[in-house]
């Protein structure tokens, strides 16, 4: 049997369902700790319940996933932290079977060159790669920020950016993570890219990655969703948001205000069961749906501002 890392997130009971939804993106098999479920148990046969269970704090719960060593636990941890921070959820994350100080070093074990779109090739800074004709190389050393191109959500959003972003476009990347989509936009010919994240660590890593790639037209900054987004330079031709469905829905009514008429929005990070909800929210916010792309259980959608 291989080695497994338990990732356990404790939170308020009111946030347990949301935390479970985020954790299910990493792994479908969840272990949920909710002392309130004791009240729902059928004890007609006189089962004995441990006193610690009966007296457990009903206001808190926890969700755990078990990630196989070959799945790269470091990326799963970074993904969970980024998504929960973005949702503004208070939580405590603990690991069993993996030391926190070892996270950064695990990237080199799992992270190899990967093609995320027809022309976009993500290459770790420590790897040698011979470019093919037409390749655009993204040198990435993501450290503690999520977004290496290995997840379907990143690839889906990258393909939409490659296919629909026009050269010279003013681009907004909401929830930039490692900066991978901002760098992709820059490599594809964007005129200016503004990349934001709520996590200061992600912003620092994204800026470092932009510097490594000589993306001088990318500016990284801290913002809680759209709150700190710069519009002094004008509205945006292309907006990308590779985040979770709940956050997309939260900003669905406001995003149109940041887009030029005819501008495009690419959203990703949407599990199948949330696709209709996300589409409806963005359409209600005034945007028109153009297309949906899917890979496995994940969806990315393209919208436009028509007026």
Image (cartoon, rainbow, N blue to C red):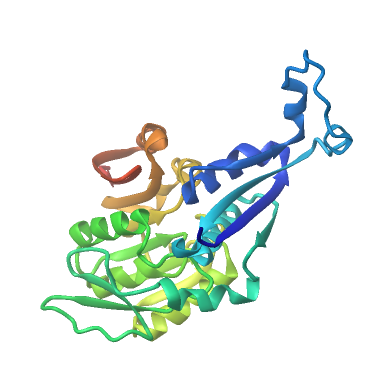
Q: Position of residue 51 (x, y in %)?
A: 89, 34
Q: Quadrant of residue 216?
A: bottom left
Q: Can you say whether 14 is above or below 88 in the image? A: above
Find residue 63 and report its horizontal and vertical position in percent: 64, 45
- 95 horizontally vs 234: left or right: right
Please indicate, yes or no, whether residue 230 appears anywhere in the rendered image.
no
Camera-nearest residue between 213 and 50: 50
Q: Quadrant of residue 293?
A: top left
The residue nearer to you, when weighing 226 against 14, is 14
Q: Which residue lies at the image location 59% right of the left edge and 53% below the top edge?
A: 84
**In this picture, is 94 found above or below 262?**
below
Identify whether 298 is placed above or below 203.
above
Hey, which residue is sitting farthest top in the picture? 44
For the residue pair 142 and 235, the one nearer the viewer reads as: 142
Q: In the displayed structure, does residue 183 sit left or right of residue 209? A: left
Residue 152 in sight in this render:
yes
Is 64 rendered above or below residue 168?
Answer: above
Q: Quadrant of the C terminus?
A: top left
Q: Residue furthest left?
A: 133
Determine which quarter of the picture holds residue 137.
bottom left
Residue 210 position, x and y percent, is: 40, 79
């Amino acid at each position: 049997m291989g080695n497994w890392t338990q990732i356990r997130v404790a939170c308020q009971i009111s946030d347990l369902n949301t935390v479970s939804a985020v954790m299910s993106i990493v792994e479908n098999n969840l272990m949920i700790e909710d002392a309130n479920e004791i009240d729902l148990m059928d004890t007609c046969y006189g089962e004995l319940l441990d006193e610690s269970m009966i007296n457990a704090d009903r206001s808190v719960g926890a969700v755990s996933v078990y990630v196989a060593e070959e799945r790269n636990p470091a990326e799963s941890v970074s993904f969970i932290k980024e998504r929960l921070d973005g949702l503004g959820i208070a939580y405590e994350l603990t690991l069993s079977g993996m030391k926190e100080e070892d996270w950064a070093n695990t990237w080199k074990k799992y992270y190899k060159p990967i093609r995320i779109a027809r022309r976009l090739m993500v290459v770790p800074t420590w790897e040698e790669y011979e470019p093919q004709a037409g390749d655009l190389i993204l040198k990435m050393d993501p450290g503690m920020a999520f977004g290496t191109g290995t997840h379907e959500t990143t690839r889906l959003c990258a393909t939409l950016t490659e296919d629909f972003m026009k050269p010279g476009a003013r681009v907004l990347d909401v929830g930039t993570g490692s900066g991978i989509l901002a760098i992709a936009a820059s490599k594809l010919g964007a005129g200016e890219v503004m990349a934001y994240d709520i996590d200061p660590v992600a912003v620092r890593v994204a800026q470092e990655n932009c510097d490594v790639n000589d993306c001088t037209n990318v500016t990284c900054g801290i913002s809680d969703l759209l709150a700190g987004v710069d519009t002094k330079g004008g509205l945006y031709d292309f907006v990308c948001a590779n985040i979770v469905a709940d956050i997309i829905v939260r900003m669905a009514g406001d995003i149109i205000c940041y887009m030029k008429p005819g501008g495009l929005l690419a959203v990703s990070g949407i599990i199948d069961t949330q696709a209709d909800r996300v589409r409806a929210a963005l359409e209600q916010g005034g945007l028109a749906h153009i297309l949906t792309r899917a890979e496995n259980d994940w969806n990315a959608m393209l919208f436009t501002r028509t007026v």
